[in-house]
Image (cartoon, rainbow, N blue to C red):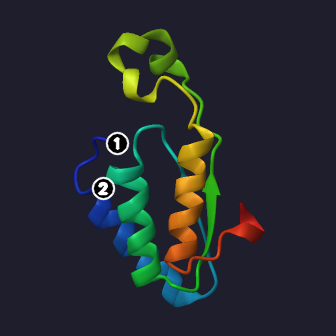
Amino acid sequence: SGIKNYWEVVTRNHKLAYECGDMIIRHLVMPNHLDCCTEPILKWISSNTPRALVNIMEQYRPEYLVARHPEKFPEIYRRPYAEEMKRAYSLAEKLGIVYEPVS
């Protein structure tokens, strides 16, 4: 996202919300970002908010600047492949994350 302290702020806020009650976390799977993003995020969720439901989303579409300038964003100039989604779901299952009712 390019936002300073993004991870720290988001994880802090998720912990605070989790302490207040039930929650659903929405995670958008990005193409070519399973190792750097989806895996660490799902691991964090399983360790820090284990009862949260997780909506694992495959709705990413290359829009706006990505669609206008695909040469600048080749790694995200496509929708997630089915294999990437299967890998995200498999990791969630391995980590004990409940995702099926909300995905």
The correct choice, above or below, for 62 with respect to 86 in the image is: above
**Which residue occupies 50% across, 66% down?**
91
The reply, left or right, for residue 101 in relation to residue 25 is right
Question: Counting residues from the N terminus, which is met first, the one under dot 2 or under dot 1?
Answer: 1
Q: Which mark, residue 61?
A: none
**Which residue occupies 58% across, 73% down?**
93
The reply, left or right, for residue 31 in relation to residue 25 is left
Q: Which residue is mark 2?
A: 6
Nearer-the-camera pick, 43 or 52: 43
Secondary structure beneath dot 1 equals loop
- Badge 1 crowding class, 10 Å Cα cut-off, few under 14, some 14 to 19, many 20 or more, is few
Secondary structure beneath dot 2 equals helix
Is residue 26 in view? no
**Where on the picture, by quarter, is residue 1?**
top left
Q: Say whether marks 2 and 1 touch (CB < 8 Å).
A: yes
- Label 2, label 1: how far apart the Cα atoms are: 8 Å
In the image, residue 67 lies at what x, y percent? 51, 15
**Where on the picture, by quarter, is residue 14?**
bottom left
Amino acid carrying mark 1 in the image: Ser
The reply, left or right, for residue 12 in relation to residue 25 is left
In the image, residue 90 lies at what x, y percent? 56, 64
In the image, residue 12 lies at what x, y percent? 35, 74
Q: Which residue is mark 1?
A: 1
